[in-house]
Image (cartoon, helix red, strand yellow):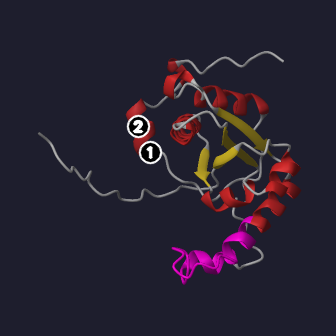
Amino acid sequence: MSKPQPIKPSEISMSAMDVIYHRRAVREYMPEKIDQATIRTLLDAAVQAPTAVHEEPWAFAIIQDRKILDRLSDKAKQLISSESDAIHPLRDSHAMGRLTDPTFDVFYDAGTLIVVYGKPMGSFVAADCWLATENLLLAAHSMGLGTCVIGFAVAALNTPEWKQELGISADMMAYAPIIVGIPSGETPAVPRKQPEILIWK
């Protein structure tokens, strides 16, 4: 299979600033799966991210099997709902109510999940993986796709049972589960606070 070519700048209709300012966390999707060529283009964009001492510690898992996504969603809800810490930030919140709903899918019915994993290669693995994640999110938006990082799924993905099921090495760590798909509607902007500047000398 030939390696897909990176998207040419002339094929991107938005400036970098447009992409940054208009990307949204999308939670409503059409049922279509993302094709392999598009996924490979997104991964190619992801690995252009900065990386400490050029270690490139990231690796990716792509899950499009609906049955696997449904079971993983159930496991994620079970782990969070059984959290015993009374000061868990989700306690007594709207989110906790949704997590106890058997019909709620933590992946919002998206047909594609891309998980960014990190290899045990030093102190900056997490930072590198999150930089790759942001590249993927922005690239997807530039291509008209929706994305959302699903933090609810991190704990489930890092259990020994799910690493074994997916064939992921025990020493790998899931950092960013990202759903990708075709948005089924518009996602409104969420206001951001002004940058908090601690010091400017």
Residue assigned mark 1: 22
Query: Label 2 near label 1: C-beta < 8 Å?
Result: yes
Q: Can residue 60 be seen in this snapshot?
A: yes
Circle 1 SS class: helix
Residue assigned mark 2: 18
Crowd band around label 2 with a 10 angstrom C-alpha radius: few (<14), some (14–19), many (20+): few
Question: Can residue 92 be found in the magenta stretch?
Answer: yes
Circle 2 SS class: helix
Q: Which residues are magenta?
A: 76-99
Residue 126 location in percent, x, y? 55, 42
Identify which residue, 134 or 66, lies in the foreground.
134
* Disc ID at residue 158: none
Q: Quadrant of residue 75?
A: bottom right
Residue 162 location in percent, x, y? 82, 54
Residue 65 location in percent, x, y? 86, 50
Q: Can residue 108 be seen in this snapshot?
A: no
